[in-house]
């Protein structure tokens, strides 16, 4: 009887029963071209909540508990969580280092649960606290650099300041310090205008380091297609993005949930394999909060403990990208899974083909629809093409398996 009941208990529990977690399935994450891939070079995206500012006496710090982390893993099917360590504001890390202990509670439990976890330097003026950022991230890298779970986010939301003259030099110094200790874990870099100007960063990307991605933030009540267009520009320029924070409400964190625009964004994130964390797992009386005021700080929340936003977000996370989360690291039957890099093209284009299909047809066409390259995949997992014969312009790599077609836009400069 017991056995039969267990069969009805969904993917997450069966994964748990056989000892699999998001991190055991996917291992270390890395950046290939404009995509984030797992240990098998498969494109992946993860979904979960972001905790609120950790600042002392702000209220959000109460939810930095191991019970909350384990609850969102088991009840929300969250594969990632973000710890947002307040820096310069009242009660933040600069004046109160107990914030670091709060972050470590979350990171330690995420590692225990096999989830990915973002250590976020939650600041709007990080360039003014670079010395402290370097000291903090060196400690985090020494403590956690060997864990595949950990992602460093070194600048939450820069204001309207220069990418090339302020943010990029700050980021390079912090990255250098982290990379002296931890050579590989993902590092996410904030972009100008509250992490919206990813297109600006993509015109002058950080070079010389592996596994660097860039922050895109949006609030669905405020930001619409023109911000998605900026993200497309950045992806086409070849940088990888991560949505470390987004809201279903207005950019000030308040207002009503915009479900229509949220769904447009979620389709966009799923289509482009963008990992995301929702702002915020907190009970403050504002639209973005996932929890109603006074909700338990040890999880166990029912539907009535979640706000309108919280219920929508939980539904998104549980079902992320068609159930992708529960299958992360396993390749779904017949689904095309492809990554092509570098993009924009250099001499050689590498194409990783990760699906279970024995045969797939690959073509590259120009903007007139003329086929400039064609290949039949036969049990290959990786191809390399010399593209030096292509003239500058836009091309489309299409992969078809008889059931679905995937298209990737390629740029030759
Ligand atoms: Mg490492």
Image: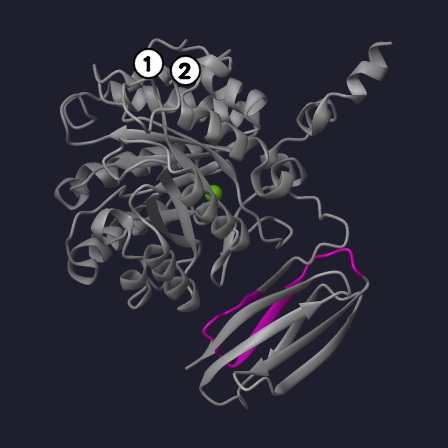
Image location of residue 347, percent across then percent down: 51, 81
Q: Indicate which disc residue 202 carries.
A: none
**Is 377 or 97 nearer to us in this picture?**
377
Disc 1 packing (10 Å; few <14; some 14–19; many ≥20): many
**Is 113 or 322 nearer to us in this picture?**
322
**Is 255 or 59 nearer to us in this picture?**
255
Q: Indicate which disc residue 65 carries.
A: 2
**Is 65 or 93 nearer to us in this picture?**
65
Rendered-image quadrant of the C terminus: bottom left
Is 237 on the left or on the right of 129, as rendered? Answer: right
Residue 129 sits inside the magenta stretch: no
Rendered-image quadrant of the N terminus: top right
Is residue 293 something that shows in the picture? yes
Asked if disc 1 is less than 8 Å from ligand 1, the answer is no
Residue 354 sits inside the magenta stretch: yes
Q: Which residue is mark 1?
A: 62
> Residue at image x 44%, y 49%?
183
User: Disc 1, disc 2: CB below 8 Å?
Assistant: yes
> Residue at image x 78%, y 17%?
6
Coloured how?
Answer: one colour
> Residue at image x 65%, y 51%?
40
Q: Secondary structure at mark 1?
A: helix
> Residue at image x 80%, y 22%?
7
Give the image quarter of residue 330. Answer: top right
Q: Which residues are magenta?
A: 340-357
Q: Secondary structure at mark 2?
A: loop
Give the image quarter of residue 259. Answer: top left
Is 219 on the left or on the right of 344, as rendered? Answer: left
Is residue 79 something that shows in the picture? no
């Amino acid at each position: 009887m017991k056995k039969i009941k267990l069969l009805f208990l969904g993917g997450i529990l069966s994964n748990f029963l056989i000892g699999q977690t998001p991190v055991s399935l996917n291992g270390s994450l890395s950046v290939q071209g404009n995509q984030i891939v797992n240990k098998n070079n498969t494109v992946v995206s993860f979904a979960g909540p972001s905790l609120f500012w950790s600042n002392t006496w702000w209220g959000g710090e109460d939810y930095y508990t191991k019970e909350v982390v384990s609850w969102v893993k088991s009840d929300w099917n969250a594969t990632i969580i973000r710890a947002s360590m307040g820096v310069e504001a009242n009660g933040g890390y600069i004046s109160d280092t107990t914030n670091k202990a709060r972050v470590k509670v979350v990171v330690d439990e995420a590692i225990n649960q096999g989830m990915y976890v973002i250590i976020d330097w939650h600041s709007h003026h990080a360039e003014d606290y670079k010395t402290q950022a370097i000291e903090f991230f060196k400690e985090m890298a020494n403590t956690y650099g060997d864990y595949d779970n950990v992602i460093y986010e070194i600048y939450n939301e820069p204001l309207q300041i220069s990418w090339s003259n302020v943010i990029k030099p700050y980021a390079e110094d912090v990255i250098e310090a982290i990379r002296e200790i931890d050579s590989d874990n993902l590092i996410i870099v904030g972009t100008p205008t509250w992490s919206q100007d990813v297109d600006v960063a993509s015109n002058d990307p950080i070079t010389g380091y592996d596994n660097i991605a860039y922050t895109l933030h949006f609030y669905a009540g405020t930001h619409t297609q023109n911000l998605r267009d900026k993200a497309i520009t950045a992806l086409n320029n070849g940088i990888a993005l991560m949505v470390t924070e987004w809201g279903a409400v207005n950019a000030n964190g308040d207002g009503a949930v915009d479900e229509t625009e949220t769904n447009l964004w979620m389709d966009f994130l799923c289509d482009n394999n963008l990992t995301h964390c929702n702002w915020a797992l907190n009970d403050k009386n504002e639209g973005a909060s996932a929890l109603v005021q006074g909700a338990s700080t040890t999880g166990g929340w029912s539907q009535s403990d979640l706000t309108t936003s919280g219920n929508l977000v939980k539904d998104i996370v549980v079902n992320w990208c068609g159930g992708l989360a529960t299958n992360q690291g396993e390749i779904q039957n017949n689904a095309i899974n492809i990554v092509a890099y570098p993009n924009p093209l250099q001499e050689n284009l590498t194409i990783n083909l990760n699906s279970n299909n024995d045969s797939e047809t690959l073509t590259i066409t120009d903007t007139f629809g003329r086929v400039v390259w064609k290949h039949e995949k036969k049990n290959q997992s990786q191809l390399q093409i010399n593209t030096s014969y292509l003239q500058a312009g836009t091309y489309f790599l299409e992969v078809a398996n008889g059931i679905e077609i995937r298209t990737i836009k390629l740029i030759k400069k």
